[in-house]
Image (tube, rainbow, N blue to C red):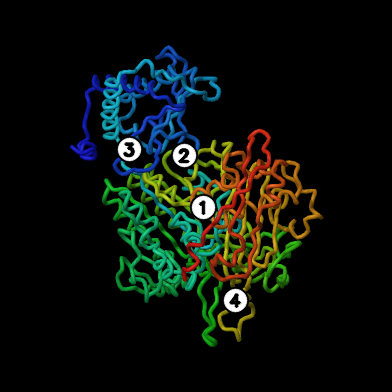
Amino acid sequence: MALWTMIDSRPTLSRSTTLVTLTTLALWLLHLPKKRLNLAYRRRDADPPLYHCLSSSIIGLKISQLTAFPVTINYTPYISRQNVDLFYPSALIVPVSQDFLRETLSAFLLILTMQSCGVIAQDALLRGVCFAEVVREGAGKDINMVSISELFKSVLVSVTMKVMFGIWLLWGLATAAKQPNILFILTDDQGKLIGGLDHMPKLQENLIQKGATYPKHYCSVALCCPSRANLWTGRMPHNTNITDVGLPYGGYPKVVSAGWNDNYLPIWMQEAGYDTYYVGKLWNSHTEENYNNPYAKGFNGSDFLLDPWTYRYYNAKMTRNGETPVSYAGQYSTDVIKNKSLGFLDEALANPDRPWMLTIAPNAPHSNGSQDAVTGATWFGEPEYAPRHAQLFKDYKIPRDESFNKIIDGAVGWVADLPTLTEEEINYIDEFQRCRLRALQAVDEMIGELFEKLDKAGVLNNTYIFFSTDNGYHIGQHAMQPGKNCGYETDINIPLFIRGPGIPQNQTIDVVTSHTDLAPTFLSIAGTTRDGLDGKKIPTTIDAGNADNKSEHVAIEYWGIAVPEGIYGYKSDNDSQPGNSYKNNTYKGLRLVSDDYSLYYSVWCTNDKEFYNLKDDPLQTTNLASNISAHQSYTIANRHLGQIIPRLDALMMVLKSCNGDSCREPWRQLHPKGYVNNLADALDSGFDEFYANQPKVSFSECSLGYHIYAEGPQEFNIYGSGSTAKRSEGEYVSVKRWGFFDGWL
């Protein structure tokens, strides 16, 4: 009988057989010459790592009275992969130390015995994504486990143990619970700093107060279509080569021609056994002419907004499941999206044995697509809202902080040429922001109804709910008209909230994450993974913020122009436009956040540079890179700015064309032996010569799309050392980054 057939048949074992099996399992585990003890299983629908615990309901279970050993059982949800040693993909990991090996085995055997005897719920063994850690009270760090293989030299005994272990695994799989559901709400241009989150009571009540907040979450590119491609593929924008909202560098036709319509998250989720649904905006340049040429793949049910009606709040046009587009003229689009979403949720709930993922992507609070009836000029005006919200926020004003209507000291590029806003313009953008807040109220109402339906259906406790947006937004900061496209915190720091099984409630998880990490996270929940992704699963424990090896970097990139919005911004008719788009907005950026420093570094296509110390200057009012010698008082690890920037240049050299591991662990590309894991490590004076000789990020032109020939050197040096203790200078090895995507147009 095939292995998977055996699993499907759900074999049952008597309790006596189970106890014998568990005893044998413990003996076999003693035989493993590993530093960490690993119980490995492989689910039918899970090829990648997925960590399960025995029970998420037992916290700190004292069993010292039940055994001869004083031990404590701790459960911590979502341990990250890099913190454990894998014995086999899809593993339950139990770290043990030499001194407490027997205590660990006794405790673990007891838990398994309790589970088999019904003390722990039958569905608890593989329920939830958890990490079971057995720690003796007062124990120190793990040390090498004593190999006692001499006790088990009989091959026959070893084989027998492994066979019985396999039987136990099948028994454990028979108790597995249904995969959790996923609800993902993705707004448009909301941002975090000026995004109106405090004015969304249903979001606060149902998600923020009952879930985890990620204050250091970033988009990799501050533009709709490229950011969504990054999110749906788990790959950096330079790897998707979707860098604009329309041809030749982006939009739905480019998504199709680049092959992403056949290789992105919705399809992967279906392959993992999920029913997938989508309502709202999927891609830019997704139109009435190309919506079924081909139709967007990967959905059991879909209802997409189509351009150019995507941003017309009272004149939306949508296509349901590939059928002829339908106009919803006169209806408020967010309400239309809400009703369609609730309908798909009913459809998903009608199949209780099937896990589902529903994504809802309203166009709010994106600017409204506006057109002058006389001249025909088009522009993005203030968003429209439902009449029931017209009286809200009448006294609201954009915060008059230190960045409002003030030019950056040391500004570069087109930002340096901006005039300050007039009183008339300030009054206009205040009303513009009021309209954004009003437009979000219908989204907030939708959130309330979604949670109510999930609760009534009894599935809320088995559903992960995510809330985010595609990119941030600036409005008045640094004297800028409404818009995005920049590398400033207003544009790249975006909301992320997660609620679900094992997620701490009303807590902040202090880790640096990005949209590149969302696809791996969704896949992890589904019990699967993909090779070639640039991101990693988002941690979901409060302790993750205190981890020594937590990530501190996000790579930011952008190509093309910046488009100011509103009546004082860009208009398509050159004869009537009061403003213009800003050229030469191509840049590479780097955001680093740790306990000791918080900074943003960028290199523009004009080869101008920016460096902001966000720990002391969170509003980014002073560009330290404009005059490095004048800002030598700024230090990290007692190293001044002139010593810091070469390290950032080297890090950016890796990240600007990274792929896979080099995106996740860029310092390891420069220091393969693992001496350097963050900026503070790299600032060791022993590396000064190495970084001084590194190639620098530069541009030969301001390209509108990703052309590798325009982006300067594509090689960086690798540090080689003959002595890890002295960190002596070694040979420099050149690594070539090839431009696979340069011909994509």
Residue located at (65% from left, 43% from top) = 730
Q: Residue furthest right?
A: 630
Q: Viewer-nearest of labels 3 and 4? A: 3
The percent position of residue 481, horizontal first and vertical second, equals 64, 69
Q: Label 3, on which residue?
A: 42
Q: Are marks 3 and 4 in contact (CB under 8 Å)?
A: no
Mark 3 / mark 4, whichever is N-terminal? 3
Q: Viewer-nearest of labels 1 and 4? A: 4
Q: Label 4, on which residue?
A: 570
Mark 1 / mark 4, whichever is N-terminal? 1
* Badge 4 amino acid: Tyr
Q: Could you say which quadrant of the image residue 6 lies in?
A: top left
Q: Do the residues labelled 1 and 4 touch (CB within 8 Å)?
A: no
Residue located at (64% from left, 80% from top) = 578
User: Which one is in front, 33 or 625?
Assistant: 33
* Badge 2 amino acid: Arg
